[in-house]
Amino acid sequence: MYYFYWLPIGTDAKVRRIPWVTVAIAVANGALFAALHLTPGAVAASYGWAFKAAHPTVGSAIASLFLHADPMHLIGNMVFLGVFGPPLETRIGGLRFAICYLACGWLSNLAQAATILSLSPGLAAAPIVGASGAISGLMGLFLVRLHFAHLRFASVTMLLLHGVVRPTRFTLPATAGIGLWFALTIAQALAIEAPATAYVAHLGGAALGAVFGLAMGLVPESRLEHLLTKGRRYAERGEWFAALGELEAYLARVPGDADVLVEAARIQRVTRQERQAAERFREAIRLWLEGGARRKACDAYEEMKRLLGPDAGLPPTDLLRVARANEELGRSGDASRAYEAYGRRYPERHAAILALLKSADIERRLLNNPGRARYLYEEILRRPLRADIRDVAEARRRAAEELLERHAAAAG
């Protein structure tokens, strides 16, 4: 004889930011449960707030979503909320998430009430409490927006005749995991012959969540993220060309996603497509610079040089902007190298000499590297210069030499 129980404990769908609405719902449930059980007589008084099939109201339907019968009831619902809530909220937004949560809870309670009045009218005054209908709605919404995600489960199998307990973990696709969960819920409800059990609220909530997801137009967003997810899974397995194909399909629809451009560039470098990889890096850096994401642009430039070599340069305007951004971010070494790269790569441009001067000044003043600074000043002095710029370069070269002499004296 066996007893099998399993609980979702996580998903591979990333949470993109802090899910404030999910946090607020969890805190409200926990705080209300504690307040009711710590205040004498409050639990009995809460019967009046609970939703009942005999007297269904919108207020009691919403209030019941924050009432729980016992600690395990609360913990179980909050575990489900913690798994499905954050990835959904950070994709559809807090307002739509809150509306879907409350609406699914309210309407699923109405469905449960109708079932009770039809099948067990003697239970019409019994309270219907818990967030199960609302959370089931999130699970239905999850199937529309994140059907391609994988769910992690913890399970316990008890061999009752032998007294053996076997805990384990496993992973399932979301469609299989959620589908099996509801199938198990229905089987348990039917097996114990409890028509008032809230499995109607569970199923009704899930159906409503799926309807809300379709009505909100989440299917195109789901398809796009599915392409990204498939590409990343292929990449994790080292199936580079398959991964690149999925990312290319995504970029054909969203060409301005700089993060995915860099992902594709990394794979193209692995597959020996250096020219295409450099183009992708350049485009991503341009987009980040235009969007004010200076740190990402500078990081991508350094990564491009590391992966593709110093010859994979940037257009002059973008290279100068990266140099300035590094300087503003306090990355003196990176700024010096970027200014130097500009001066060497584009010697015919008016700003080339000024860029080399800037690089040499950073080496001398900020990096305390007078030897490198003197080398750059000497290179500048070998180029055709205006008289005033030559005087400046010569004076700074002498300053670098004096600093070198002081270093040598201190070392001696």
Image (cartoon, rainbow, N blue to C red):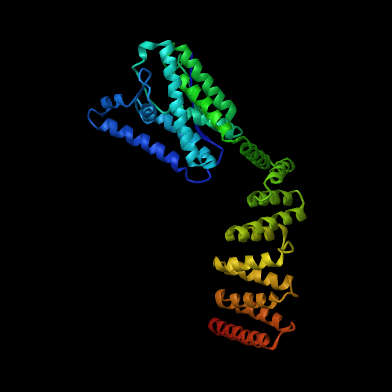
Can residue 164 be seen here? The reply is: no
Q: Picture coordinates of residue 51 (x, y %)?
A: 36, 23
Residue 329 vertical position relative to residue 254 in the rendered view, above or below: below
Q: Picture coordinates of residue 340 (x, y %)?
A: 67, 72
Residue 52 vertical position relative to residue 218 in the rendered view, above or below: above
Q: Picture coordinates of residue 42 (x, y %)?
A: 26, 29
Q: Give left or right: position of 380 versus 172.
A: right
Kindly identify the residue that appears in the image at 36 percent across and 17 percent down.
54
Kindly identify the residue that appears in the image at 63 percent across and 50 percent down.
259
Q: Picture coordinates of residue 155 (x, y %)?
A: 50, 26
Viewer-side residue, 403 vs 409 = 403
Can residue 212 be seen here? The reply is: yes
Residue found at the very far left of the displayed protein: 40
Circle count: 0
Kindly identify the residue that appears in the image at 54 percent across and 26 percent down.
178
Viewer-side residue, 301 vs 17 = 17
Name the quarter where the C terminus is drawn. Answer: bottom right
Quarter-of-image position of residue 232? top right
Kindly identify the residue that appears in the image at 58 percent across and 31 percent down.
214
Viewer-side residue, 236 vs 81 = 81
Residue 247 vertical position relative to residue 69 in the rendered view, above or below: below
Quarter-of-image position of residue 193? top left
